[in-house]
Amino acid sequence: MNKIAILTTIMDALRAEFDTLQSTSQKTRAAGNDAESKAEGKYDTRSTEDNYLADGLARQAQGAAQAGAAYKDFSPPRFGPDSRIDLGALVQLTFPDETHWFFLGPAGGGIEVIYEGLPITVLTPESPLGRQLMGLKIGDSTDSPRSKVRSVE
């Protein structure tokens, strides 16, 4: 698989996530500060809640931007048939009922992208599965979830 194209797809997904979160944050903040959301009584907290929500969305948008920046200059290494899994690896795992592709990236864990019709989930080395995969080779297994490394690219 073309890892550069996969990286581009991941960066596009992070950019779209940033745009969505930033736009939603701005709209929520505007709604919270609008004259129509002014408190109608001492127990009316709509405006305060809208602003807290806008703050949370803005923090998530900042996280998506930082994840995108982590990929800007990231150049994944090449992996051979005897290579150990490390940052930048594209890994195919076989589970009892299915197989799935994962990309071990520097950030953006949990993002799922579609490349050539295949779903690829981004893992970071800090995630539970990412931590288990680091250093494994083709044929090695993980315990939780139970899986076997089928391919490393």
Image (cartoon, rainbow, N blue to C red):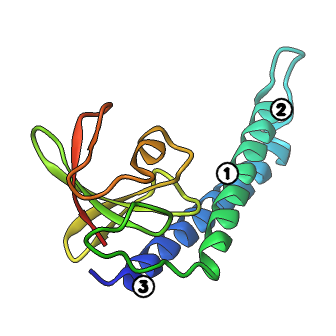
Q: Amino acid at mark 2?
A: Thr
As drawn, 121 above or below 43: below
Decide: few, some or many residues near mark 3? Use Cα within 10 Å; few <14, some 14-19, many ≥20: few
Mark 3, residue position: 4
Is residue 32 visible in the rendered image? The answer is yes
Q: Which mark is residue 3?
A: none
As drawn, 134 above or below 141: below
Mark 1, residue position: 60
Work out whether mark 1 precedes mark 2 in sequence or the reverse, and give the earlier one: 2
Query: Foreground residue, 114 or 86?
Result: 86
Q: CA distance from mark 3 to mark 1?
A: 26 Å
- Asked if the residues shown at circle 1 and circle 2 are in contact, with their CB atoms under 8 angstroms apart, the answer is no
Is residue 27 visible in the rendered image? The answer is no
Query: Foreground residue, 98 or 20?
Result: 98
Q: Element type at marker 2?
A: helix
Q: Residue at x 53, y 51 (%)?
A: 125
Q: Element type at marker 3?
A: helix
Q: Position of residue 14 (x, y in %)?
A: 54, 67
